Image (cartoon, grey):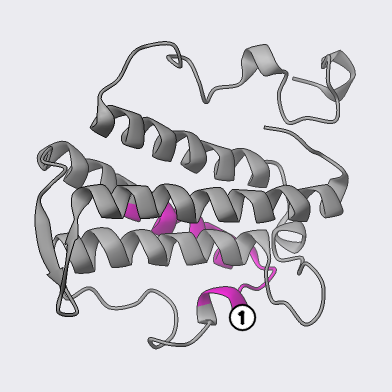
């Protein structure tokens, strides 16, 4: 929608056009609630990055922080990969960016279209893997070993909601700093 026709030009989309909540009044069980919240937060991340150039996506928050929207996409791709491939699927999946313990997902987020394309491709691949894994494994109480402790599917989904909620809050501030847009 062009800027001039939006009821709320300070937002990405008008509230009635928000793609995140088409079924918000449908009652859900525990699993459905978690899956829906996680889907909403993933869409929120995409909305907050929509329409930005590589330079804007790589814009750092405030020194000395290396936080940027592009780094956030890379980081969340790595988080999705870690929990759904490494922990729940028990795959030996290598890190996407840098060695374990490094902040390469944030630090190496550069203002190049190829870096943006690679980040979104990795994030979408990891989200698709996670969504399929959850569809194939409906037992919320299913537990796996994680560094000597047990972790359930429920724990992972709640953690992912928490991870996205925190970073979508950061994304609000980053996007507002870039072009003044707020909301959603």
Q: Residue 75 or 108: which is nearer the viewer?
A: 75
x then y, percent, for residue 134: 20, 42
Query: Does residue 2 appear left or right of residue 157 in this picture?
Result: right
Q: Residue 10 or 25: which is nearer the viewer?
A: 25
- Residue at x 31% of width, y 48% of height: 157
- Residue at x 17% of width, y 76% of height: 92
Q: Residue 54 or 129: which is nearer the viewer?
A: 129
**Residue 90 appearing in the image:** no
User: Main SS of the magenta segment?
Assistant: helix
x then y, percent, for residue 38: 41, 40
Query: Does residue 62 appear left or right of residue 165 in this picture?
Result: right
x then y, percent, for residue 30: 26, 31
Residue behind mark 1: 107
Instruction: For label 1, count other residues whose C-alpha is less than 10 Å away and answer few (under 14), some (14-19) or many (20+).
Output: some
x then y, percent, for residue 6: 82, 17
**In the depicted structure, whether residue 64 falls above or below residue 21:** below
Q: Is residue 117 magenta?
A: yes
- Residue at x 50% of width, y 51% of height: 164
Q: In the picture, which quadrant includes the N terminus?
A: top right
Q: In the picture, which quadrant includes the C terminus?
A: top right
Residues rendered magenta in the picture: 105-126
């Amino acid at each position: 929608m062009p800027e001039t026709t939006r009821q709320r030009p300070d937002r990405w989309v008008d509230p009635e056009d928000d793609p995140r909540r088409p079924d918000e009044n449908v009652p859900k069980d525990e699993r459905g609630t978690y899956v829906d919240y996680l889907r909403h937060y993933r869409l929120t991340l995409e909305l907050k990055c929509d329409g930005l150039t590589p330079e804007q996506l790589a814009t750092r928050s405030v020194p000395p922080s290396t936080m940027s929207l592009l780094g956030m996409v890379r980081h969340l791709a790595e988080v999705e990969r870690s929990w759904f491939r490494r922990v729940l699927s028990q795959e030996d999946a290598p890190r996407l960016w840098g060695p374990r313990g490094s902040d390469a997902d944030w630090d190496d987020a550069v203002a190049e279209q190829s870096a943006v394309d690679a980040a979104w491709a990795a994030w979408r691949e990891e989200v698709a893997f996670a969504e399929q894994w959850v569809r194939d494994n409906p037992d919320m109480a299913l537990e796996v070993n994680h560094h000597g402790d047990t972790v359930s599917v429920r724990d992972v989904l709640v953690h992912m909601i928490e991870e996205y909620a925190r970073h979508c809050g950061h994304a609000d501030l980053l996007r507002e700093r870039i072009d003044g847009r707020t909301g959603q």
